Image (cartoon, rainbow, N blue to C red):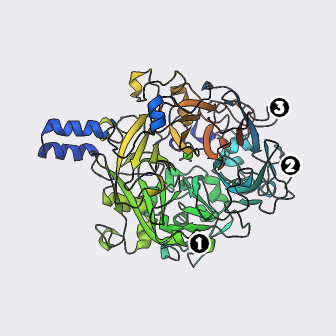
Amino acid sequence: MPSSEQRPSALCFDDPVDAVGRNNTPNPSLDDIVARRLRRRDALRGLALLATAAGTGALAGIRPRPAVAASGETTLSFTETSSAVSPTHHVAPGYTARILMRWGDPVLPGAPAFDPANVTADAQAKQFGYNNDFIGYLPLPAGSANAEHGLLWVNHEYTNPDFMWSGLTKDTIGEKMTADRTKAEMAAHGGSVMEVRKENGTWSVVPDSRYARRVTATTPMRIGGPAAGHDRLKTAADPTGTSVLGMMNNCSGGKTPWGTILTGEENIHMYFSGETSGPEAANHRRFGVGGKGTVYPWWARHDARFDVAKEPNEANRFGWLVEIDPYDPMSMPVKRTALGRFKHEAGTVVVNNDGRVVVYCGDDEKFEYVYRFVSDGRFDATNRGANRELLDHGTLSVARFDADGTVRWLKLRHGEGPLNAANGFASQADVQIEARRAADLMGATKMDRPEDIEANPVTGVVYVVLTNNSDRTPEQVDAVNPRAKNYYGQIVALQPPGGRGKDADHAADTFRWELPLLAGDPNKPEHGAKYPQGISNGGWFSCPDNIAFDPQGRLWIATDQGTDWPRTGIADGIWACETEGASAYVTKCFFAVPIGAEMCGPEFTPDGKTFFVSVQHPAVDGVKGSNYDTPATRWPDFKDGVPPRPSVVVITKDDGGEIGS
Ligand code: FEO
Ligand code: CA
């Protein structure tokens, strides 16, 4: 989802909107911290320290892989494709990109074929939903490493009604969103489970699979963890505070080692209308819920639970990471409140070197935070069921990035520090529901839109992807967010202590950090971009969003410039690089999306020979006058009368080898 442009096109036109949640807290910027240090210490020494922390190699633990370092040659041998904007997608020569699933394709047995003239709730509830984002591949059978037969979970983040139905304009969209169309929108949200198989080198969806499932904005779900049953989660429809209908705006996510999906509810404020002056008023303001944050006002018109004036607690039941078991179509999704409530992007799970489970989470809004959960219990690889409630018990922390290259994980524990009743936190449930405000009080570092966070399985280094922040002023610049009016984004590398790969201690109180890459066009000094020597003319990118690692530990970066892509003139897509050695962070363009689309969902099969990606909202972003009737592209069908369709694309190498090699 283009979060700085987080609205259906008919409502936002082409102007990036401000962040709607408000982080007005006076947390010290790193400039303040540095200034204090400079007052205490020798000024020259302090400036040298800042220069080091800002990206000249502060991570003592990141060591080159010798073979690569010696030769200086990248193992990424593919020839770059062009990042030019065009009506269709492009992949590097020698690779084939096929459409696997499109919006409206049948998922459940008995689902009707896609009929663009007849998009109904009944049909949509059985078909592939809209705006595919996160993709998770889970092998069949469960627990195997099968790279040619498995389940594919796909998030359906949000809807663009002016691309789903004919005749909607920005002036008429509100009145034309009937109750039936609103139900269809709700059914187009959520996620899909599909069984997929590779035969004779070609992937397809297995029809009528017993695993096939649609999860929507009305699917019954359980609430688990420390906020379950709390008064602030109780509503007229659910006086227990433990049961909720649906999930919304599921952007990115992650997979657990026990074979479930974590899917992140992101911009949930868009669905709520009205305003409350009651006890939830400040909480809703901090989250951007209600008032001007509303994007889908017809949801509240047709379903009163989305009116916070009538049901102020309903919004507290969204904004969580949801755990779903794709192997069991009858299983009930669970909202894991121990992981905190904010605008969730990633939910990346790592088994720590001591067996505890660590989940890294980004809160995707300007000036929001990076979070980490550490479970109390340990992962049991021999007993799947023993891991079911691991994510209900543990400690949520938030990151402070110090100018000396230290990351401090600040624990969000009720009763510790300022997280007490005097500050409105009467219990741990309050801390989880208002995780943002708890993080404010703890002095977390305000970041440039934290999106994906992933750990390199080979090195153990954790990468935090910051997409952009055009609202940062020169006074707000700090070492880890070093550019004002940051339209281009950056990638932060975090080194846990303890050793490489599985030896890394992801639960440690402090890590080290550095900035290996500042995105943007290196040929334009005004962008302030930073890449290593050796980048090609087409090797640069803007607005990194979701990332993946292949089995060799190479980094694959998906971008989302939103409506702002005319600023750079390039398409969104996938760029790849090594993370160690002489070619580290020399990025190369591998795939480009069609005009108006965003790239999301990068996911490899365990053998590295298949690469699934999501093409979201083709024809939508940054194209004036584009809609169902006059789209900027009719990708992927290119048939008159058929609108553009968000789709999952599957990429394989023509010689059958590993992607990138
Ligand atoms: Fe849905 Fe953070 O992009
Ligand atoms: Ca995203």
> Is the C-beta separation of discs 1 and 2 under 8 Å?
no
User: Where does the image place residue 243, in percent across and percent down from the top left?
Assistant: 61, 73
User: Is residue 536 shown to the viewer in this render?
Assistant: yes
Q: Quadrant of the C terminus?
A: top right
Q: Is residue 355 left or right of residue 426?
A: right
Residue at 46% x, 46% y: name it: 463
Q: Residues under labels 1 and 2: Cα distance?
A: 36 Å
Q: Residues under labels 1 and 3: Cα distance?
A: 48 Å
Q: Residue lying farthest bottom? A: 240
Residue at 48% x, 30% y: name it: 586
User: Where does the image place residue 474, in percent across and percent down from the top left?
Assistant: 31, 35
Q: Nearer the viewer, mark 2 or mark 3?
A: 2
Check disc 3 and report its element: helix, strand or loop: loop
Residue under pointer 1: 388
Residue at 75% x, 55% y: name it: 194
Which three-letter amino acid code belongs to the residue tagged 2?
Ala
Sort mark 1 into few (<14), some (14-19) or many (20+) by Cα contacts within 10 Å. some
Residue under pointer 3: 640
Q: From what the image shows, is residue 365 above or below residue 171?
A: below
User: Where does the image place residue 36, in percent across and percent down from the top left?
Assistant: 17, 47
User: Where does the image place residue 372, in percent across and percent down from the top left?
Assistant: 43, 59
Q: Earlier in the sequence, mark 1 or mark 2?
A: 2
Q: Earlier in the sequence, mark 2 or mark 3?
A: 2
Which three-letter amino acid code belongs to the residue tagged 1?
Arg
Front one among 22 and 348: 348
User: Is residue 475 shown to the viewer in this render?
Assistant: no
Q: From what the image shows, is residue 523 above or below residue 108?
A: above
Residue under pointer 2: 113
Q: Earlier in the sequence, mark 1 or mark 3?
A: 1
Sort mark 2 into few (<14), some (14-19) or many (20+) by Cα contacts within 10 Å. few
